[in-house]
Amino acid sequence: MAKIEGPPAESPVTAASIPAIGHGFRLQWEKAQNAHVLLYAEGMVTLNGSAGAILSQCDGRKSAAEIAAELQHTYNQPDLGDDVLAFLRIAVDNKWVQLQ
Amino acid sequence: MNAAVNAVNTDPEPAVAPPFWLLAELTYRCPLHCPFCYNPVNFAAIKAELSTDDWIRVLREARELGSVQCGFSGGEPLGRDDLEILIREAHALGYYTNLLTSGVGLTEKRIAEFKRGGLDHIQLSFQDTTKQTNDFLSSTKTFDLKRKAAELIHKYDFEMVMNCVVHRLNIDHIDKIIEFALEIGAGYLELANAQYYSWALMNVDQLLPTREQVQRAEEVTQQYRERIGNRMRLLFVVPDYYETRPKRCVNGWGTTLFAVTPDGTAVPCHTARMLPGLKFPNVREMSVRDIWYHSEGFNHFRGTRWMQEPCRSCDERFSCLGGCRCQAYMLTRDVNAADPVCDKSPHHAVVTDMVARANQPRDPDAPRKPLVFRGAEESLAHGHDA
Ligand code: SF4
Ligand code: SF4
């Protein structure tokens, strides 16, 4: 029988998607790593600054567009919409976030 | 003597990172009798369990040191009626909290309280609940119990992970075990061959599967993987007696794991307290930080400086780190020996002999040495010779 597990399907993340931290994952700030980390059963991902900033906004209420707007404001940056979407696609594929 | 050793062994001292994992073995008490139990054979003689306050202090100190994962195990951790308190405390401290349980004694009241307290993850182990290991797969009691536990785990929205210790007597039914895990909705199934320590070593002749059995089981597992895709992840761990290189001990002695046994003895690996001549401190007397960084028990086998030949000059020494110290000691009576699973070890024949015995044809009618099931009486009877 053929393998079902193919390459990851294109994640359907759009500006209107509402991301939340994935089931079984936990996001927190770790003093020891001086970074945000994602904890899951038996493991941990240490996040870089922008990944940590985006995931901290994934509260299951804000849309991807709203998250981008919020970060643009906080970090005084021009349009971050594409960066946020690109990261959220990776995050969905890794199950770090799920779409509401 | 140290100077002489260092003159030859110029490997750098490893930089010591904080322990990633805190394993809290809350109790050796357990209602089950697994013949492969990894608790010390003399567990029944070890009585004085840490108090709730002691455990809370250990949780806090390890967290301050940088631990992020906390596992509650045993014995059966549900045997502690302060488990709810400890989970709540661990969660509040910022640990990712894991409960490793057989599910015996799991009630709705308790699991609801675990959820409220912030428990993140449950690993349900699948094993016989009766002493009839031979036909445990037909024992409805086993299945009913796991089904009930699984229902509760789903109802309270925990990710469900299942773990099954595989051995000669159940390995031919691995398909049934996989089917059952699928049926109860596990997201992940770990099929780990028994490791031959403590109780399992006493029973090695009855538990070590044949090479053919292992191959067949691996094939069946692979077929399931292909069939079910990512509906459930499957891990199959080969018994290391069938390998020629040993595994690292818990990802490297004193690198990742800080385990605390029920009476407070701290060890860098679950089974390390069997090693003679090494003093392992008790958390009642020493802080977690001092134990991790400054105790002899944790420092002695860190890195590669302790090694003797053939490990000392071996170019693979940084990857396997000489293998498991307990296995080396159990099978060669020398704590500094290469793990005899390694085919470079002069003692490798101990392992190949056991494998040869396992692969000899057996007369099904011949009288067989009975399995020794884990239990308090058996512990008192065999405790001294393990
Ligand atoms: S291996 Fe079996 S007997 Fe040992 S602690 Fe676990 S469930 Fe209990
Ligand atoms: S000789 Fe020692 S270091 Fe080398 S592979 Fe074998 S166990 Fe590992």
Image (spheres, coloured by chain):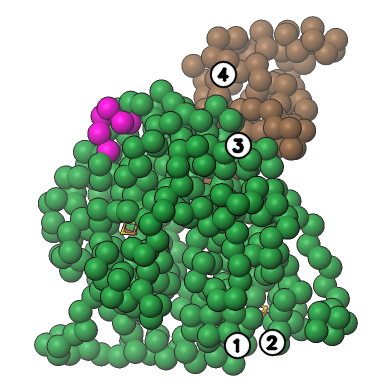
Q: Are marks 2 and 1 in contact (CB under 8 Å)?
A: yes
Type of the residue with mark 2: Pro
Task: Respond yes or no on whether mark 1 lies under 8 Å from ligand 2.
Answer: yes
State which tag comes first along the sequence, 3 or 2. 3
Q: Which residue is mark 2?
A: B310
* Colour applied to chain B: green
Give the CA separation, mark 4 to mark 1: 54 Å
In this view of the protein, which residue sits in the foreground, A2 or B255? B255
Residue type at mark 1?
Answer: Ser
How far apart marks 2 and 1 lie (CA) works out to: 7 Å
Q: CA distance from mark 2 to mark 4?
A: 54 Å
Q: Which span is picked out in magenta?
A: B106-111
* Marks 3 and 1 share the same chain: yes
Disc 2: residue Cβ within 8 A of ligand 2's nearest atom:
yes
Give the labeled residue for mark 1: B345
Residue count near mark 3 (Cα–Cα under 10 Å), binned few <14, some 14–19, many ≥20 = some
Q: Are marks 3 and 2 in contact (CB under 8 Å)?
A: no
Label 2 environment density (alpha carbons within 10 Å; few <14, some 14–19, many ≥20): some
Q: Dot 3 corresponds to which residue?
A: B60
Contact between marks 4 and 1 (CB within 8 A): the answer is: no
Discs 2 and 1 lie in a common subunit? yes
Who comes first in sequence, dot 2 or dot 1?
Answer: 2
Quarter that holds the N terminus of chain B: bottom right
- Does B281 appear in magenta? no
Q: Position of residue B382 (x, y in %)?
A: 32, 76
The secondary structure that dominates the magenta segment is helix
x and y, in percent, of residue B267 in the image: 56, 59
Is circle 3 on the same chain as circle 2? Answer: yes
Tell me the quadrant of the picture where the C terminus of chain B can be found: bottom left
The chain whose colour is brown is A
Question: Looking at the image, is A86 positioned above or below residue B163?
Answer: above
**Is residue B376 in sight in this rendering?**
yes
